[in-house]
Image: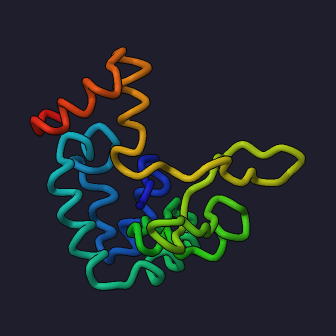
């Protein structure tokens, strides 16, 4: 993610991309022009970013005061040591699915993340309760519906 909407950072980005002329080009010099020509701007920046790794881009951009951040893929997020340290991710033992990583609540009480009170139920685990309590079906009616493959 690169955030160079203001003209000062846009100029820095153009220099880093080896395209300093774009900073003064009337089509791109102001945010309104860059927005109007968004597809071209995205293509040019995309061509430049494909020549570097995400970390190289992060290092180069941040060293030059261009706001940026690495957007991670889900597998990277789910194994991020920092998120485990902060308690945003926790490993739990699920009785049917085994060891798994879950997101936790962002709320912190006394500075500590809360452990989940219960694990997510398996698909259909609450069906009988819903059929009975919410829909008012009897056990016999539920059994009949199952037998007829309606539920």
Q: Quadrant of the C terminus?
A: top left
Q: Residue at x 86, y 51 (%)?
A: 111
Task: Choose between 87 and 148: the one closer to the eye.
Answer: 148
Res 17 visible = yes
Does 132 sit left or right of 145 as displayed? right
Does 22 sit left or right of 89 as displayed? left
Q: Quadrant of the N terminus?
A: bottom left
Q: Residue farthest to the left? A: 148
Does 89 sit left or right of 134 as displayed? right
Q: Position of residue 115 (x, y in %)?
A: 72, 54
Q: Is residue 17 above or below residue 107?
A: below
Q: Residue farthest to the right? A: 110
Q: Is residue 59 above or below residue 92?
A: below
Q: Position of residue 21 (x, y in %)?
A: 28, 65
Q: Residue at x 19, y 40 (%)?
A: 36
Q: Quadrant of residue 93?
A: bottom right
Task: Choose between 134 and 84: the one closer to the eye.
Answer: 134
Q: Residue at x 67, y 47 (%)?
A: 117
Q: Position of residue 149 (x, y in %)?
A: 11, 39
Task: Choose between 10 and 126: the one closer to the eye.
Answer: 126
Q: Quadrant of residue 128?
A: top left
Task: Choose between 80 and 151: the one closer to the eye.
Answer: 151
Res 61 visible = no
Q: Position of residue 3 (x, y in %)?
A: 44, 54
The count of marks equals 0
Q: Residue at x 26, y 50 (%)?
A: 28
Q: Is residue 60 above or below residue 31?
A: below
Q: Residue farthest to the front? A: 140
Q: Is residue 75 above or below residue 131?
A: below
């Amino acid at each position: 993610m690169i955030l160079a909407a203001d003209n000062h950072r846009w100029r820095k980005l153009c220099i880093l991309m080896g395209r300093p002329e774009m900073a003064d080009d009337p089509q791109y010099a102001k945010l309104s022009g860059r927005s109007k020509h968004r597809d071209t701007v995205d293509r040019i920046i995309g061509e430049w970013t494909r020549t570097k790794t995400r970390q190289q881009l992060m290092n180069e951009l941040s060293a030059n005061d261009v706001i940026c951040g690495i957007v991670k893929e889900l597998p990277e997020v789910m194994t991020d040591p920092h998120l485990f340290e902060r308690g945003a991710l926790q490993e739990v033992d699920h009785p049917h699915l085994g060891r798994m990583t879950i997101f936790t609540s962002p709320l912190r009480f006394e500075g500590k993340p809360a452990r989940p009170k219960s694990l997510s139920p398996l698909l259909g685990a609450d069906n009988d309760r819903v059929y009975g309590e919410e829909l008012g079906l009897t056990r016999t009616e539920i059994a009949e519906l199952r037998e007829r493959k309606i539920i």
